[in-house]
Amino acid sequence: MNWKREEISDRLAAVGYIADRDIATALSLMEFLKRPLLLEGEAGVGKTEVAKALAAVHEAELIRLQCYEGLDQNAALYEWNYQRQLLAIKTREGAGENADAIEEHIFSEKYLLERPLLAAIRRATPPVLLVDEVDRADEEFEAFLLELLSDFQVSIPELGTIKATSIPRVVLTSNGTRELSDALRRRCLYHYVDFPDVEREAKIILIRTPGIDTALALQIARLVAAVRKEDLRKVPGVAETLDWAATLAGLEVQDLRQEPEAVHETMICLLKTHEDRARLTREVSERLLGKVA
Amino acid sequence: MAADLPHAARPRESGDPALDSRLRGNERNEAIGEPTRRRLAGFARTLRDNGFRIGLAETRDALAILASPAALRPASLRPALRALFCATHSDWERFDEIFVAFWQGYGMRQRQTLSGSPLQSRAPARRLAEAQVPQDALGLPDRVQRRSEGDADAAADGRGRREGASRVEALTTADLRHIVDPEEVAATHALAARLARVMRARLIRREQVRRRGRRLDLRRTIHRSISHGGMPFELAWRRRKIKPLRLVVLLDASGSMSLYTAFFVRFLHGVVDSFREAEAFVFHTRLAHVSPSLRDRDVTRAVDKLALMAQGIGGGTRIGESLATFNRWHAQRVINSRTAVMIVSDGYDTGEPERLGAEMRRLRRRCRKIVWLNPLIGWRDYSPQARGMQAALPYVDLFAPAHNLESLAALEPFLAKI
């Protein structure tokens, strides 16, 4: 492999992303085999962050396509600027131009609005294309995406075929709200992103929360890991951990054991439903605290 | 597959720079010895046998990885092959085990049979012939599949039981496979198809272009206006699209339900066959996803496959736990905003009723409607006293009897409104 795994790890760390070993391998493999990478995992484990970090590592632009039910080609690929086209038709008609010339004019690049997918293949340097939550889009869109990912060209009826000037690095994420097609899965490398282990989460806290104490970061990571083991409806993700760490640092908590009150009060950063909040009573939080800190 | 590999690795003409570089990588592959190639092909085959979806492209890329410096360190080889060969979370979880077994043990000849794996379905091929034999000609009943209420020993001693089998006993030991009456099969199928028709369509938020509608589609309108020189004569409208209702059926296959399981398995097959979107699960002490096996159009074979999955009967029903598994691992994937969940169970739960209640509450929040069909309601003196049933009832939209085809058919108008 032209890229060593350690090198990727280091470069990811340099841009503020603490990678586990396997994701570094997947990223170097992505480079090596030129395949897209499909990331799955629960909400909040940092799937989107991987794409951001990848863009930072390559110093490439990050183009993001957020998928949703009903997403169609026009929102994902290109769109004509209809308002401008209408105006152009009117003014040119007024000037007495013939219809063919007008049509030629209004379907030119000038009136084309680039959407993420088209933008991604028309950059001079290869960008990172993040297709976020691809499971939210419809099956039809998935098929279209598959075609784009294998050919890297787009045909616009009014303009002709547009070939990729550079092949983007593609990262897809999925939360598993719908089963993805076998074809798409096979096209991609696969990585299941899990919640970070205690050590890695502590490192993430240290990097992202300025001025936090190492011992405190470790305590927080341990406590969060224990909270995740509780039977919760919404398991807190890394973003929640960071919020909580920032809150505790803001309150100038030095040692979780010293301030069980503050710990319990600020747990709203981690727990996002009423049910979970009710489940983690003061006693539970103190028990968890006693176990980990 | 081994024979295909060298051929597939041969570089082809291509204008695509990405592909070219990959193929150049393959030229180096020629350096890989034949034994390694064979071994890799064997590994790919083992994975395929375990339900991994691996094509030639993956094997070719794996060769490229083996030819790269990464192969020198086994520590990085495993994650690399894992990223390449896995396509789903369940693949991901099983990969390490298979990898270790194949590369560090002897070659893994045996397929792993994990619960709920669609690959299990291939296993009972041998039993198929047996299942097609008319009921009375059936020889030794096999112990695993026998849906006996009694303990395993009694079931194993099947020959003795069969000789003196009364009509009643034949019913209580109704095997999942004993569903060969073609008329009944057809009737059940027809009902499922009818239900599928009336329950089919639900409005969703997504819109599509129509001649009439509630919102103007500016893009299409202007596109059409071009032929009139920019004058929007023909208006295009958008209207909400209609999408099929999805039905998820959870069937209790525990001992207490054994009288009805056969019938409902047949119904399940009809549902999976007729609904455009349907998923089926069977549970007793654990939950198994059975839609892949039910997709088989041959009802005998489908039910035969299912019989194997539903094994392990006895030891009571853990509805709450099964629902928890469903909520945790399947619900997100199979349930969307237009999903109705149908639970078929007598509500006799050996687990904690609180657990069942909590899981029902979770399920309630996710899906559109919950229907609970309870075969016992058909009995004259039945009232839902089972503690589990009590805990679940508050979250159920339709609680109805269903112990045979007639009672299920009578539900049609209610189900249509779900």
Image: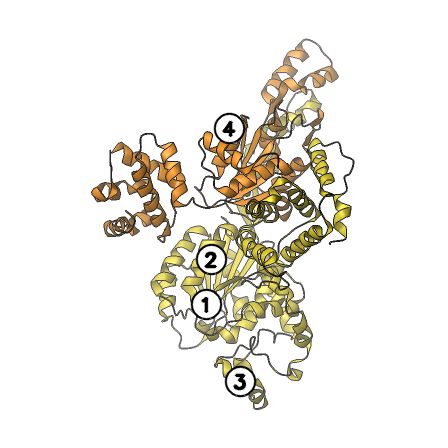
Chain colours: A orange, B yellow
Report if the CB atoms under discs 4 and 2 are less than 8 Å apart. no
Sequence-wise first label, 1 or 3:
3
| Label 4 and label 3 in one chain | no
Residue denoted by label 4? A56
Residue denoted by label 1? B285
Residue denoted by label 3? B169
Q: Residue A167, percent across and down?
A: 64, 30
Mark 2 crowdedness (10 Å alpha carbons): few <14, some 14-19, many ≥20: many
Residue at the image point whose x is 63% and y is 15% from the top: A88
* Quadrant hosting residue B29: top right
Report if the CB atoms under discs 1 and 3 are less than 8 Å apart. no
Residue at the image point whose x is 60% and y is 25% from the top: A114
Q: CA distance from mark 4 to mark 1?
A: 49 Å
* Quadrant hosting residue A168: top right
Depth-wise, is mark 4 or mark 3 nearer the camera? Answer: 4
| Label 4 and label 1 in one chain | no
Quarter holding the N terminus of chain B? bottom right
Sequence-wise first label, 3 or 2:
3
Q: Residue A98, percent across and down?
A: 74, 14
Q: Is residue B202 visible?
A: yes
